[in-house]
Amino acid sequence: MISFDCAELAEAVNGKLLWGNAEQVFSGITTDSRKVTKGNLFIPLVGERFDGHDYIENSINSGAAVCLTQKPIPQHDNASAILVDDTAKALRELATWHREKHNIPVVGITGSVGKTSTKDMIACVLSKQYEVLKTQGNFNNEIGLPLTLLQLDKKHEMAVIEMGMSGFGEISRLTAIAQPQIAVITNIGVSHIEKLGSQQGILKAKLEILEGLKDDGLIVLNGDDPLLRGIRGSLKHRTVYYGMENGLDYVATCYESLGESGSQFSIELDGQTYKVSIPVPGIHNVYNALAAIAVGMEMKIPIDTIIEGIGSYSPGNMRQNIISFKGIKIINDAYNASPQSMQAAINVLEELCSKTRGIAVLGDMLEMGDMASELHYSVGSFIKDKKIDYLIAIGNDSKSIMKAVADSGNQKIILQHFENNKDALKYILSIIRQGDYILIKGSRGMKMEEITDGILNSE
Ligand code: ATP
Ligand code: MG
């Protein structure tokens, strides 16, 4: 656990001792006063709804030894306080300072979709040979990333760090802290297009990751993504591309779905062909596995060990978890949605329901701005050729998903639209039967887990 004294801390965060003792030592850091344990450093952050400074008193009562503050606060006998301009900036500075003390290779991962899955896949591979620190869950923002890196300690040999963003400048700040040796970009989709204006804007924002990349670092890019492919040859760092098209550095061929138990593909390396099994379904996972192979090869892990690492992958909560309930299979992907991840999930549904009925329950994809109806329509255009039985759309924007299927003239897919989850659930419960596969997916704000929970709690 990270541990040092106030004098060193003040230096790392450009702060000054407000009161207390410069030799006061702390160990462990938290930004949540409810999680403070004895001897911790408490960093109060100012959010939209809460100001952590209101909880400094509580944190000291719970045993915090030191706290940062960006405003004067009353003195306490049992603790020390360091005054800084901005506590969030201080957290980033502290993480940068700490990362620089650990001279290990960091893998940074960004992209529109598949960051967490790719991060976990890469960590599975690297953990076969190295002691790895990885971002827990989705802790990928300007608070989660520094807190993750602050967990680095002597035992770690590598770190695998997810970087998320919703606007320009964020990845730039994150990569400055993480200073990756390897930068992976999974794809350029349309998430957050409302803020970033265009896909070119999104590309530019993701490429900010290169600002922190070490000079001798490696860029790992999805070569089947048109925008990433488009910058081929223009980057100053060594670059490798992965995908399913010929002419890339890591190419997957012979994709085969194995149903719920996953899929397999082949890859040729140094003139030899290897079979790779992925324990979760969906062709999108091939891309995540290819990124992991590229990173593993760069880190000199033998290919057989890399393949074993991929075999040990399991997805995170609400990301395509398959739940069995009274003979019904729920593909719970309620965590979030964007056009690309919708397509990935619909592919999985189609793969799994080849011999039974497939029901897609899709909620709105939010934050799409002016492009909302066009992008929802594009998901419908993707669905129109799929062998599924029902499309149940929920919310206002998702009417365009249905419209695209209706416009296509495909009458095999039964279309239903609902304004809210409650009405949709009632309908779903009236039609589901044993053997069905039901995909549940929508943006976080659509709370699609209400549908999953509703089915699981039904008689
Ligand atoms: P967030 O922005 O919420 O952090 P993320 O980029 O970390 O998202 P994941 O959580 O890995 O993305 O995946 C979200 C969903 O996207 C998955 O459940 C799956 O449906 C789909 N997905 C995962 N990997 C890919 C991929 N490489 N390409 C397209 N879709 C993917
Ligand atoms: Mg994520």
Image: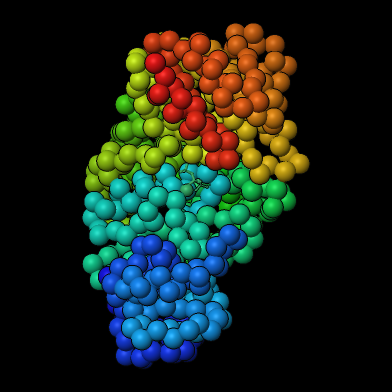
Report the number of discs: 0
**Vertical relation: 210 (above or below) 250:** below
Residue 229 versus residue 139: which sits nearer the camera?
Answer: 139
Q: How is the image coloured?
A: rainbow
User: Residue 337, image x and y in percent?
Assistant: 56, 37
Residue 261 versus residue 318: which sits nearer the camera?
Answer: 318
Quadrant placement of the N terminus: bottom left
User: Residue 184, image x and y in percent?
Assistant: 47, 54
Does residue 90 appear left or right of residue 371 in this picture? Answer: left
**Vertical relation: 32 (above or below) 229:** below
Q: Residue 166, located in which quarter of the rendered image? A: bottom right
Note whether residue 96 is visible: no
Does residue 122 appear left or right of residue 406 in this picture? Answer: left
- Report the residue at 69% width, 30% height from top: 396
- Report the residue at 45% width, 78% height from top: 68
Q: Residue 205, located in which quarter of the rendered image? A: bottom right
- Report the residue at 48% width, 33% height from top: 449
Residue 76 versus residue 186: which sits nearer the camera?
Answer: 76
User: Residue 439, image x and y in percent?
Assistant: 48, 25
- Report the residue at 61% width, 45% height from top: 191
**Vertical relation: 20 (above or below) 27:** below
Q: Residue furthest top?
A: 411
User: Residue 83, image x and y in percent?
Assistant: 50, 84
Q: Residue 276, located in which quarter of the rendered image? A: top left
Residue 135 versus residue 180: which sits nearer the camera?
Answer: 135
Note whether residue 88 is visible: yes
Quadrant placement of the C terminus: top left
